[in-house]
Amino acid sequence: MESYMLLAQAIATAVVTFLLYELWCLRKKVRKLTKSPSLNSKVVVNKKYAPEPPGAWPIIGHLPLLVSAKQPHRAFAALAEKYGPAFMLRMGMSPMLIVSSREVAKECYTAKDHVFATRPVTTAGKLMAYDHSVMGFTPFGTYWREIRKIATVELFSARRIGMLKPVRQSEVSLWMKGLHEKWVHNGKSSVSVELKSQLEELTFNLLMQMVAGKRYYGSNVAKADEKMAGLFRHAVQQFNYHLGNSEMYDALPFMAWLDFKGDAKAMRNTQKDLDYIMQTWLDEHRVKADQMRATPSTTPETSSMCL
């Protein structure tokens, strides 16, 4: 029993120490921005930084301001009227620049584009994109320029895209045939079609055919691929869900370590599923490598090009 009490006291001490350290860092940052020892100024003003509204809490920043607002966009509009077209908010422990002017936005993406060219470090990118090594998640820098060059020259060149033209034609033809069959089964009369799901199936089948030579969506999935297709659809669904649901962990990074809701564990499981799927594709294409060399006229998948 005493050991549990000591453990609880140690944890409480560590948490209090961490909170005090964060508060000290916050006070130091605010004093640096304001060049004043007082924390009672109404607006944080400095020529090097956009204005920051008061009321930021230690650690969680301005999150209470947005949580209490029923319509966050109206809260942003009210702040823009008061502090100007560009101002800073702290979403948890991360600074955020809010821009509400066309002129300022244009300057950000023209004159200052090198400053905004990078991508933020996120929990989803760390846990599901190999610690931001996937091109779409990689921060701007030497590594990003190198993989962009490889992708542009080796994967997305006009020659490579031209080689995959038959795949695109085949998939679009098969998709149109499926719509025609629905029309026939309905007595050749008008039939309602949900374009969102239909176009989603077409897009993913196009990508899968070009990347791995697989079809995982719709009614034309091969029996041998049904199990893998179900796993892939579930993994993609979970990936997209966690990609847009990791804001709390990005604002409060220590929450990912505590993982109260189990999202971090779910992200790791999603990454394991995607690892298994891609490893299966690579194993299959290593076996097919000799066939590709023997029949060079065969349309290669992107994974074969990478190998």
Image: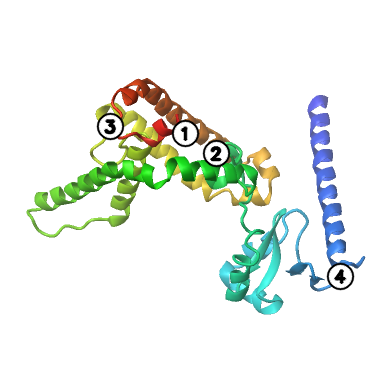
Tell me the CA gap for discs 1 and 2. Answer: 9 Å
Tell me if residue 281 comes above or below residue 188 in the rendering: above
Residue 239 in sight here: no
Identify residue for label 4.
40
Q: Position of residue 43 (x, y in %)?
A: 79, 72
Identify residue for label 3.
297
> SS for tag 4?
loop
Q: Is residue 272 left or right of residue 264?
A: left
Instruction: Give the residue type at disc 1.
Output: Leu
Q: Which of the two labelled residues, at mark 3 and mark 1, occupies the earlier sequence position?
A: 1
The colour style of the image is: rainbow
Are the residues tagged 1 and 2 within 8 Å (C-beta)? yes
Q: Which of the two labelled residues, at mark 4 and mark 1, occupies the earlier sequence position?
A: 4
Q: Position of residue 2 (x, y in %)?
A: 83, 26
- The quadrant of the image that shows the C terminus is top left
Instruction: Please state which of the two labelled residues, at mark 4 or mark 1, is closer to the viewer.
Output: 1
Tell me the CA gap for discs 3 and 1. Answer: 30 Å
